């Protein structure tokens, strides 16, 4: 069941290269990076050692504005902004994961479903680009 709600891909490049390529492609597609959370660093500050994990919070004002401009849609703001995670596993590979927004969107309908569907498609285009080796 959990695998239905999340999508995971193996990156063809190492962790740092994947993070750099993702950052550039997000900006190339006119999306905005609200924040990049370095969970490895945060957890290390509390005495625990984990493999690298960075979570990108990204949004596109065109999409987020459609939800935030109406009181009736603001309830889903707790799912905003979109999140994409880049992390290493003990197999030595780098992975990219994100919520399967298309499945989640289908449970809403209306403008929320439309915005989540459009956003999901654009985020997938970004990720597909970095999964390719140039």
Image (cartoon, rainbow, N blue to C red):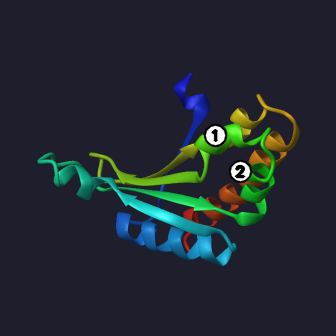
Classify 47 as above or below 24.
Answer: above
Residue sitting at x 18%, y 53%: 44
Q: Quadrant of the C terminus?
A: bottom right
Residue 97 percent location from the top left of the image: 51, 48
Classify 113 as above or below 63.
Answer: above
Residue 74 appears in which quarter of the rendering?
Answer: top right
Classify 68 as above or below 17.
Answer: above
Q: Say few, some or many: other residues with alpha carbon within 10 Å of mark 2 (under 14 / 14 to 19 / 20 or more).
A: many
State which tag comes first along the sequence, 2 or 1: 1
Outermost residue to the left:
47
Residue 76 appears in which quarter of the rendering?
Answer: top right
Residue sitting at x 79%, y 42%: 112
Spatial separation of the CA atoms under disc 2 and disc 1: 8 Å
**Towards the viewer: 117 or 3:** 117
Residue 59 percent location from the top left of the image: 64, 61
Question: Residue under circle 2?
Answer: 120
Whether pointer 2 and pointer 1 mark residues with C-beta atoms closer than 8 Å, the reply is yes
Q: Is residue 80 left or right of residue 120?
A: left
Outermost residue to the right:
110
Question: Residue under circle 1?
Answer: 100
Residue sitting at x 55%, y 30%: 3
Q: Is residue 61 left or right of residue 79?
A: right
**Towards the viewer: 6 or 89:** 6
Q: Is residue 99 left or right of residue 36?
A: right
Q: Secondary structure at mark 1?
A: loop
Residue 85 percent location from the top left of the image: 46, 52
Q: Secondary structure at mark 2?
A: helix
Residue 53 percent location from the top left of the image: 35, 54
């Amino acid at each position: 069941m959990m695998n239905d709600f999340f999508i995971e891909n193996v990156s063809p490049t190492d962790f740092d290269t994947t993070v750099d390529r993702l950052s550039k492609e997000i900006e190339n597609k006119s999306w905005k990076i609200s924040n990049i959370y370095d969970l490895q660093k945060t957890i290390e500050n509390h005495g625990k050692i984990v493999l690298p994990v960075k979570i990108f919070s990204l949004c596109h004002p065109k999409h987020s504005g459609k939800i935030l401009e109406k009181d009736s849609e603001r309830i889903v703001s707790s799912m905003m902004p979109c999140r994409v995670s880049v992390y290493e596993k003990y197999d030595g590979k780098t992975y990219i994961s994100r919520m399967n927004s298309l499945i989640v969107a289908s449970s809403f309908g209306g403008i929320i479903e439309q915005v989540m569907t459009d956003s999901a498609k654009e985020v997938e285009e970004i990720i597909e680009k970095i999964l390719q080796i140039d």
